[in-house]
Amino acid sequence: QVQLVESGGGLVQAGGSLRLSCAASGRTFSSYLMGWFRQAPGKEREFVAAIRWSLGTTYYADSVKGRFTISRDNAKNSVYLQMNSLKPEDTAVYYCAAAQRWTGRYLRDYEYDYWGQGTQVTVSS
């Protein structure tokens, strides 16, 4: 069983930064795709960023490209989301997700097999 635990959310002013962490346990993740999604009140969950664990290849939503950076630490079995130049519209619950194998698809939440509990990010204007 894979477990994902997010941390690092909080309240920040617009223009500020936060770093989210996702600690993964239960499996060897070398073949996994790891992703970050977010869900704002009244909206559907949306893709933010993803990384292929083995190659380190990264993918971003257009809305965060150039501001957010996804990375992973193999030794710590952890994935991170560095968020800079935050905007009020980035306010959401952020979820870490894991897909057991790379299929070439990463944008939809149904592509992922495991999910964390979420961490709240609030950006004030």
Image (cartoon, helix red, strand yellow):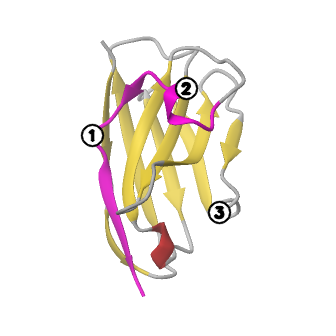
Position of 81 with respect to 26 (left or right) is right
**Residue at (44, 33) in percent of width and height:** 97
Which-is-in-front pick, marks 1 and 2?
2
Position of 30 with respect to 92 (left or right) is right
**Label 2, residues with CA under 10 Å away: few <14, some 14-19, many ≥20:** some
**Label 1, residues with CA under 10 Å away: few <14, some 14-19, many ≥20:** some
> Which quadrant does the N terminus fall into?
top left
Residue 52's x, y, as percent?
64, 28
Does residue 115 belong to the magenta stretch? yes
The region drawn magenta spans: 106-125
**Residue at (69, 42) in percent of width and height:** 59
Could you tell me which secondary element the residue under label 3 belongs to? loop
Could you tell me which secondary element the residue under label 1 belongs to? loop
In the displayed image of the protein, which residue is found farthest to the front? 42
Q: Quadrant of residue 12?
A: bottom left
**Location of mark 1 (residue):** 117
* Vertical comparison of 11 with 6: above or below: below
Residue 85's x, y, as percent?
56, 74
Could you tell me which secondary element the residue under label 2 belongs to? helix
Residue 42 versus residue 33: which sits nearer the camera? 42
Q: Amino acid at mark 3?
A: Ser
* Vertical comparison of 55 with 81: above or below: above
Lower position in the chain sequence, tag 1 or tag 3 = 3
How many numbered discs sit on the rendered protein?
A: 3
Mark sitting on residue 70: none
Mark sitting on residue 111: 2
* Vertical comparison of 2 with 23: above or below: above
Mark sitting on residue 63: 3
* Vertical comparison of 121 with 125: above or below: above
**Residue at (70, 25) in percent of width and height:** 55
